[in-house]
Image: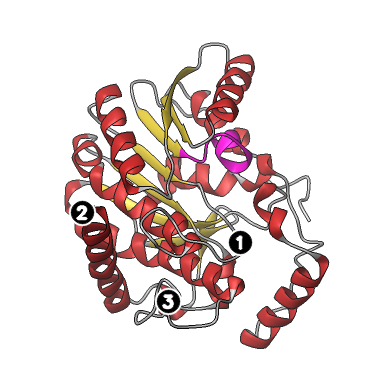
Amino acid sequence: MTTTSDPTALDIVDGVDLSGKTCVITGASSGLGRESARALASTGAHVILAARNAEALADTEAWVRAEVGDAQLSQVQLDLTSLSSVASAAEQIGELTPAVHVLMNNAGVMFTPFGRTVEGFEIQFGTNHLGHFELTRLLFPALVAADGARVVNLSSEGHRISDIDFEDPNWEHREYDKFAAYGASKTANVLHAVELDRRLRDSSVRAFAVHPGIVATSLARHMTNDDFAALNKSTATRNPERPATDFRKQFTTPEYGAATQVWAAVSDELDGRGALYLSDCRVAQAAPYAIDEGRALALWGLSEHLCTIRAQ
């Protein structure tokens, strides 16, 4: 549970000045994205709110403006389940700003029933990883132009549930397991940060993956009590050396949960560093397969191939 000593996202940005800089947040219409938007807007940054639901996006903008009187905000429609929408969003962002100083790949889905994106990707892998992979790739020029940018991928301790099956990433030849599919997508978020950092660090773009904690947001809307029990059992079985987690009890709230991703975006403690997995506003240790450089390179190649052939 959250304690009074834990920082909120607003605590993290106290005294931080990002005037003249631009931050893009996906999934900005609720939860962690909404809290991150408020925190980053309070630093003087231009915050571009990206999300699928136009009405929720407008509500978020109104809420942030009420909280931060001089907030500089823009909206961009983004549906991560459609590569054409991703391309359109990247184009709109390019029209709004020549440089992106922070790209927070925050949006995501969790433990969803089986489904596919517009291009046929498994819905969790497609939304959580491939949509963000393509958006980030299209924003390379803007990130490099910032001359000191950070990409923050929202991962999860859920990455420990499973690695990626490179032979069947979209669940075309296996019986679907929504927990394993989620775990693979969160592993992909870490591997993406590892390879992205390797590719762009010489251009002063650094990448991080973040575990925000077990946060009480709408992400858990697909979960039943039986699902929580199965998840607790699965996690204990796969990671017997780690303390048992009761996912029904160990929740924090978005204002606290967003602290680590905001810390990843602004902290000078991370200057000159990258390819790190962060939790509780500090560097943490991810599962070995999630930070393996060879697997990170392989995932990059697979992701590039999938996004290219499916977009045609």
- In the orientation shown, which residue stands out farthest toward the top? 69
Mark 3 is surrounded, within 10 Å at the Cα level, by few (under 14), some (14 to 19) or many (20 or more) other residues, namely: few
**Disc 2 to disc 1, C-alpha distance:** 27 Å
Position of residue 162 in the picture relative to residue 266 (left or right)? right
Front in this rendered view, residue 150 or 215: 215
Of 113 and 21, the residue lying toward us: 113
Which tag, 3 or 1, sits closer to the chain's start?
1
Tell whether position 173 is magenta. Answer: no
Quadrant of the image containing the N terminus: bottom right
Residue position marked by numbered label 1 in the rendering: 112
Residue at 45%, 37% (x, y): give it: 25
Q: Which residue is mark 2?
A: 312
> Residue 99 in the image: x percent, y percent?
25, 31
- Up the image or down, 211 lies above or below 293; here it is above
Quadrant containing the C terminus in the rendered view: bottom left
Q: Amino acid at mark 1?
A: Thr
Instruction: Give the answer, above or below, for where 181 lies relative to 107.
Output: below
- Nearest the viewer among 193 and 5 is 193
At 70% from the left edge and 74% from the top edge, which residue is drawn?
231
**Residue 76 versus residue 159 in the image, above or below:** above
In reply to whether residue 31 is colored magenta, the answer given is: yes
Secondary structure category for the residue under label 1: loop
Give me the disc on residue 172: 3
Residue 226 spot, x, y in % from top left: 80, 72
Q: Nearer the viewer, mark 3 or mark 1?
A: 3
Mark 2–mark 3 Cα distance, whole angstroms, equals: 20 Å
Residue drawn at the location 44% of the way across and 42% of the way down: 79
Specify the amino acid type for callout 3: Glu
- Side (left or right) of 178 relative to 249: left
- Circle nearer the N terminus (2, 1): 1
